[in-house]
Image: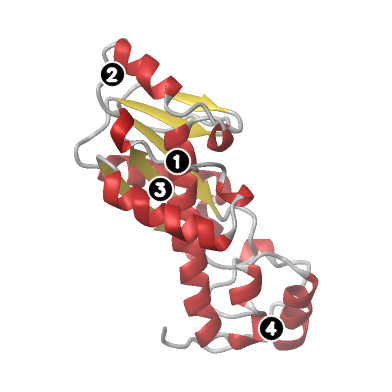
Amino acid sequence: MDELTCERELFQKGYRLVAGADEVGRGPLAGPVVAAAVILPLEEEKRILGIDDSKKLSKKKREALAEKIKESAVAYAIEEVDEETIDKINILQATRLAMKRAIEKLSPRPDFVLTDGNMTLDILMPQESVVKGDAKIASIGAASILAKVYRDALMEKYAEAFPYYGFDRNAGYGTRAHIEAIREMGICTIHRRTFIKKFWDGKRKIGPQNI
C-alpha cells in the first residue's frame, strides 16, 4: 500500500479531491454487485493505518477499518446494482454502473477518480484505472473495504430470508453446498438467472419473501 502517495502526487498536480472506487460481488451466483467510492483526507494526522485489499483482511479488521473510514473520509458513498439488472445488462456493465453511481453520489464531488482493475467509467471527471489498485492505492483499498463490509452484511440479511443457500457463509458465491442447494431446492428471488443456468432446471423456485 502506498499510503496516499498517489493521491498526494495528484494533489500536487492540482487535483484537490481524489476519489478511489472499487466493487465487490462480480462473481457470486446471487445478490447485487456493490461499489463504493471514497475521498480520503491527505493530512498525515488523519491517516488511517491498515488499509489494504479487503480480501486480505479478517472480517473483524475490515469492520473496524470501515468505521474509521466512514468517520474520517472527506466523503464516501456506497451503491448497489441488483441481480435483475445484472441479468439484463451483464455483470461488466452492472459493475460499471454501480461504480459510476457511487462516484457521482459523493459530496463534495471529486475532481479525479482512481478505479481498481482495468475499465473506463462513463464519468465526466478525469480517471485512471489501476490493476490491483485495491492493494496499491489507499483510497481504492478503502473503497474495497466499505463495499465488502456492506455487501457481506446484506448477504447475512438475505440468509435469514432464504436459509437454504448459506448466504451468510458463502456471500452468494458458487460453493459446492450452494450449488447443491440450487439443484435440490431451485432458486430464490436474488439469484442471478444468467449465472445459474448450469445448476438450475428453470422450473423450481422458492417464492419471494420479505427481508
Q: Quadrant of residue 111?
A: top left
Q: Among all residues in the image, which is located at the extreme front?
A: 45
- Is residue 34 visible in this depiction of the protein? no
2 vs 1, front mark? 1
Classify 10 Å Cα crowding around label 4: few (below 14), some (14-19), many (20 and above).
Answer: some
Which one is earlier in the sequence, the residue at label 2 or at label 3?
A: 2
4 vs 2, front mark? 2
Q: Label for residue 198? A: none
Judging by the rendered image, the residue that carries numbered circle 2 is 15
Which one is earlier in the sequence, the residue at label 3 or at label 4?
A: 3
State the CA–CA distance, disc 2 to disc 3.
20 Å
Judging by the rendered image, the residue that carries numbered circle 1 is 49
Residue flagged by tag 3: what amino acid is it?
Ala
Q: Give me the residue at 63% from left, 48% from top.
A: 56
- Is residue 206 visible in this depiction of the protein? yes
> Is the Cβ of the residue at disc 4 closer than 8 Å to that at disc 1?
no
Instruction: Describe the element under mark 1 as helix, strand or loop.
Output: loop
Q: Is residue 102 left or right of residue 24?
A: left
Q: Among all residues in the image, which is located at the extreme left?
A: 108
Q: Label for residue 36? A: 3
Can you say whether 108 is above or below 63 in the image? above
The picture places residue 38, in percent across and down from the top left corner, at 35, 41
State the CA–CA distance, disc 3 to disc 1.
19 Å
Instruction: Describe the element under mark 4 as helix, strand or loop.
Output: loop
The picture places residue 82, in percent across and down from the top left corner, at 46, 62
Front-most of residues 187 and 67: 67
State the CA–CA distance, disc 4 to disc 1.
44 Å
